[in-house]
Image (cartoon, rainbow, N blue to C red):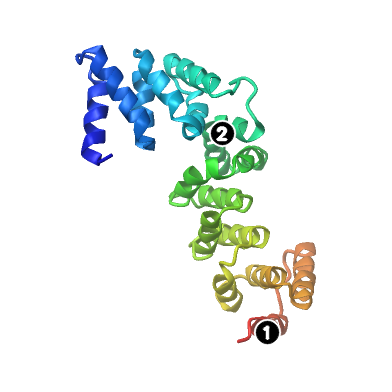
Amino acid sequence: MTDSTLDILIATLADPTTDKPARRQAAADLAASNDPRAIPPLLEAACTLQAAEEALAKMGQMVVVPMVTALNDANPKIQRTARNVLARLGYDADRLPPDLQAITSVNASLEKLVSAAQANNEIGLTQAIQALTPAGIHALEPILLLLWHEDGRVRSAAVRVLGGIRDPRAQEALADALQDGDERVRMNAIQGITRNWGGQGMEGLAKIARNANETGRLRVLAALAIGEVIGDDILAMQAGAVLDTLMKNAAQRVSESKLQELLWMIEVALGG
């Protein structure tokens, strides 16, 4: 179906002055298109047109996630339509599978994530992260948008969520976050890459480890991540020991000789 045809069908469906047979036919044609762009207008039209609800159900599994999301819509008619469509597809809106249950709380959890990060509320932040991580790819797109937030605390929180999402886009975003101007973001990106390794970020980790302008703690953390990711037990052990010492005494600085030793081990490990 061409874009112009799709636009005409959506306009016909949305126009309350159009006769009902024409709107019903538009709903049926939109369902047959299997185009995800038809879902929002069908959902809106279903508030007053039964045929639109039937059309959504005919689109099958592709509408499940949008319908679950719509369960939290401010419009009760939208909520009712979502419940009806899910029921037609064999889902009980009150007893959704765990992965679909997670979707219903994504928006609320995102709001909590942002407010907790800005308030430096670690307990609230941890709770929001724990709620978002199980949603997986359903939380990915809005989390990626938060990486452009002006507040570094929010970007840092978003990166912490990405570390628990197994998806190539999350891994790519973690690698990009190594270049963020906020040290907290870079630190969380390092930790996220260690947990969510997908073949990206090694160059960025090495760059941080080599950068004399970075703090010693961050450079050691990058060295530790490299060792753990590539399976270099000796590098990981040496960097881990230095990091343990720093954690026991926050005022202690990493000696230049120890950093140079770790850098040499990184160059050997990376074949440089």
* Residue 93 quadrant: top right
Q: Nearer the viewer, residue 219 or 139?
A: 139
Horizontal arrangement in the rendering, residue 215 relative to residue 258 (left or right): left
Look at 73% across and 72% down and name the residue there. Answer: 231
Q: Amino acid at mark 1?
A: Gln
- Label whose residue precedes the other's in the sequence (1 or 2): 2
Residue 9 appears left or right of 258:
left
* On screen, residue 118 above or below 105: below
Label 2 environment density (alpha carbons within 10 Å; few <14, some 14–19, many ≥20): many
Quadrant for residue 123, please give it: top right
Which residue is pictured at 23% across the width and 26% down the height?
Answer: 11
Q: Residue at x 70, y 83 (%)?
A: 265
Identify the residue under disc 1. 260
Q: Quadrant of the N terminus?
A: top left
Q: Which secondary structure, mark 1?
A: helix
Q: Which residue is mark 2?
A: 103
Residue 77, horizontal then vertical, whole percent: 43, 14
Q: Is residue 61 visible?
A: yes
Q: Taking 221 as reference, is 155 left or right?
A: left
